[in-house]
Image (tube, helix red, strand yellow):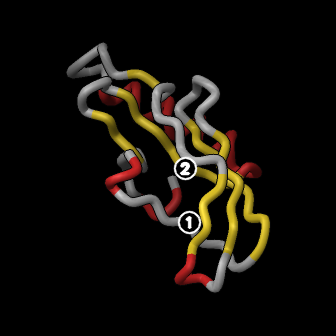
Amino acid sequence: MSGNRKQPDLTDLETKEIYEIKSEKSRATGKREISTYLSKLHIVDHEWKAGVSYSPLPQIIVPQDSGSIYFITPSQGDGVITYKMLSGKVRMLISDSEF
């Protein structure tokens, strides 16, 4: 797990869904991380699942980054939200109000 974090990038406590945010090239890593998190969560609660209900905007423009644009792909049932940079530096921001 990158950065030795040991927690999902996004967690929805109401739907009991977890998500990882990865570049398109790292989708497989995200799937492995989701699987690891779910195996640990299922020890205490079997209702947790890979996220499917969160729908991010298809494009995010990051003004602090001089107009970087990212194309975002929602989870395809595996809990992994992917992004692809269309222009600018590699950075992505998601505010709490969007979730």
- Considering the numbered disc 2 on the image, is that residue within a helix, a strand or a loop? strand
Q: Residues within 10 Å of mark 2 (few under 14, many from 20)?
A: many
**What residue lies at 74% left-to-right and 64% top-to-bottom?**
85
- Considering the numbered disc 1 on the image, is that residue within a helix, a strand or a loop? loop
Q: Quadrant of the C terminus?
A: top left
On the picture, is 38 further left or further right than 56?
A: left
Give the residue at the far left of this rendering. 44
Q: Which image quadrant for residue 63?
A: bottom right
For the residue marked with disc 2, what is the amino acid?
Ile
For the residue marked with disc 1, what is the amino acid?
Met
Q: Nearer the viewer, residue 49 or 52?
A: 52
On the picture, is 55 further left or further right than 22?
A: left
Q: Position of residue 37 (x, y in %)?
A: 40, 35
Identify the mark at residue 23; answer none if there is no mark. Answer: none
Tell me whether the residue at label 2 lies in contact with that at label 1, contact meaning CB atoms closer than 8 angstroms: yes
On the picture, is 11 further left or further right than 27?
A: left
Precedes in sequence: disc 2 or disc 1: 2
Identify the mark at residue 92; answer none if there is no mark. Answer: 1
Q: Position of residue 92 (x, y in %)?
A: 56, 66
**What residue lies at 36% left-to-right and 47% top-to-bottom?**
7
Q: Residues within 10 Å of mark 1 (few under 14, many from 20)?
A: some
Q: Position of residue 50 (x, y in %)?
A: 47, 26
**What residue lies at 61% left-to-right and 37% top-to-bottom?**
74
Q: Which residue is mark 2?
A: 21
Q: Nearer the viewer, residue 59 or 50?
A: 59
Residue 66, placed above or below residue 33: below
